[in-house]
Image (cartoon, grey):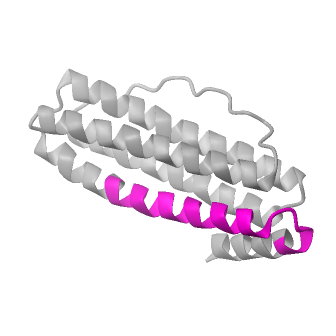
Amino acid sequence: MLSQKLQAALNDQINAELASAYLYLAMAAHFEASNLVGSGRWMRRQAREEVTHAMKIFDFVHGRDGRVTLAAVAQPPAQFGSSVEAWEQVLKHEKGVTDRIHQLYALAVAENDYPTQTMLHWFIDEQVEEEKTATTILEQARMIGPSNSALYFLDRHLGKEAEG
């Protein structure tokens, strides 16, 4: 059974994962409004992935006889600046998610909750991948600079990657 403190923290993480999905949907809308459909498609995929993460924790809490309590999700911004600025925000956001997961893990360790520690290992590994991907895309966007033709090719690549 989950402690009340750990249950509350896991509920907060469910909310954070859903807020991440909402943020990525807002970024998808931003990119699509800028005719960067591939980047928008990539963000839509990320949004779906974040909902999957929320549900993984949701199911875990229920599986441990806990109680899920949902909170309101904050409205994300509607504008994200240039492509580089948007990808900078993605990386910053993913680093924040990593910090949250690490704090959750530290709490699970302090509570001697081994099942939660085991579940969170998956998220720790996932965040390594998420930060690496965001860093790679950001660096590519920085390399191409203001070149519209290069941005077009990066956008096409992201769109194809989102389909695969």
Question: Could you tell whether 110 is left or right of 121 in the image?
Answer: left
Q: What residue is at 32 percent from the left and 29 percent from the top?
A: 9
Name the spot of residue 10 as percent of width and height, x first.
33, 34
Question: Could you tell whether 90 is left or right of 160 in the image?
Answer: left
Q: Is residue 142 above or below residue 28?
A: below
**Is 10 covered by the magenta stretch?**
no
Q: Is residue 84 above or below residue 64?
A: below
Name the spot of residue 115 as percent of width and height, x first.
15, 47
Magenta stretch, residue numbers: 124-150
Of 17 and 63, the residue lying toward us: 17
By secondary structure, the bulk of the magenta-drawn segment is best described as helix
Badge count: 0
Of 159 and 11, the residue lying toward us: 159
Q: What residue is at 72 percent from the left and 62 percent from the top?
A: 142
Q: What residue is at 19 percent from the left and 52 percent from the top?
A: 118
Of 118 and 93, the residue lying toward us: 93
Q: Quadrant of residue 31?
A: bottom right
Question: Could you tell whether 99 is left or right of 154 in the image?
Answer: left
Quarter of the image that includes the N terminus? top left
Residue at the left extreme of this rendering: 112
Question: Could you tell whether 45 is left or right of 17 in the image?
Answer: right
Name the spot of residue 46 as percent of width and height, x first.
59, 56
Quarter of the image that includes the C terminus? bottom right
